[in-house]
Amino acid sequence: MTKFEVGELFDEIVFYYPSFTGNSKKINAWYIVLQNVPFDLALENLHLYVGNPENKYSPHPGALSVERKSDDDRYHDYMRISGMQMLEEAERMHKNAVPPTDEQRRKVRELIAKRGSNDMGTGSQP
């Protein structure tokens, strides 16, 4: 944002908060905070700020500098991050997985064989 745009932002603030005043010192101070913030973002944040009935006083530059997200945006960000973490965990588990030992395989074969012989002897069907 340029100093000229900070001045435009001041004009917009005065429209909503007539007691808000600005001078060259204040413009310079706000410019230091807002110089890396796009004008459109600061203006959008101002409109969000003004739309909140709890904000009875004019905003400070920090209130206009952060990117605001809706509840839907925050929900989707959370779901995206959770999904990425789940995939990373699944990949980690896949990389660290080991096959069953020979002893485990032998026991499973014995259980299957025992079950198969029990099923045949009782006449029941699987």
Image (cartoon, rainbow, N blue to C red):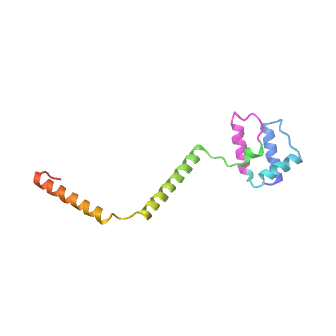
Q: Nearer the viewer, residue 101 or 66?
A: 101
Could you say where residue 34 lies in the image, as x and y percent from the top left?
77, 51
Residue name at image x 45 percent, y 58 percent: 90
25 vs 42, left or right, is: right
Quadrant in the picture for the N terminus: bottom right
Residue name at image x 56 percent, y 50 percent: 77
Q: How many numbered tags mark residues here?
A: 0
User: Which residue appears farthest toward the right when viewing the image?
Assistant: 24
User: Residue 126: within the magenta?
Assistant: no
23 vs 1, left or right, is: right
Which segment is the magenta one?
40-59
User: Residue 48: within the magenta?
Assistant: yes
Residue name at image x 44 percent, y 64 percent: 95
Q: Is the magenta region chiefly helix, strand or loop?
A: helix
Residue name at image x 10 percent, y 54 percent: 121
Could you say where residue 69 lies in the image, as x and y percent from the top left?
63, 46
Q: Nearer the viewer, residue 41 or 77?
A: 77
Could you say where residue 42 lies in the image, as x and y percent from the top left?
73, 48
Q: Is residue 16 above or below residue 99?
A: above
